[in-house]
Amino acid sequence: MEFEMFSEVSLKEDMAEYDLPKGTQAIIVDYCPRPAGTEAGYVLEVLNEEGKAFTVIAVAASKIEPIAVSMPY
């Protein structure tokens, strides 16, 4: 799956190497293309509980999913 720059995503699984649990929210800040046959990745700004960036990590595209935005009616 390809994501748009600056879209909000969440981690699909625990990322022990960064001490981040599944569901941690982040914003995509860069795309990391890879050679054919290997998985592309993204650089993420990880958000804290207040929604402010507190760290930057790089992950494979398969490790993140979009955050559904619900519209109030």
Image (cartoon, rainbow, N blue to C red):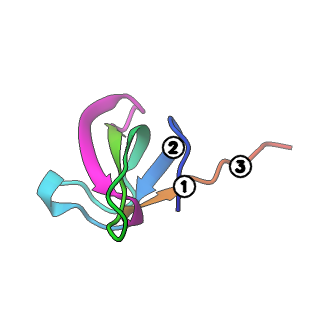
Sort mark 2 into few (<14), some (14-19) or many (20+) by Cα contacts within 10 Å. many
User: Which range is magenta?
Assistant: 47-62
Residue projecting furthest to the left? 17
Sort mark 3 into few (<14), some (14-19) or many (20+) by Cα contacts within 10 Å. few
Discs 3/1, front: 1
- Image location of residue 52, percent across then percent down: 37, 28
The residue wearing badge 2 is 8
Is residue 46 depicted above or below 15 in this figure?
Answer: above
Residue at point 26%, 31% (across, down): 54
The residue wearing badge 3 is 70
**In the depicted view, which residue is nearer to us: 56 or 60?**
60
Q: Secondary structure at mark 2?
A: strand
Q: Secondary structure at mark 3?
A: loop
Q: Are marks 1 and 2 in contact (CB under 8 Å)?
A: yes
Q: Quadrant of residue 13?
A: bottom left
Amino acid of disc 3: Ser
Mark 2 or 3 closer to N-term?
Answer: 2
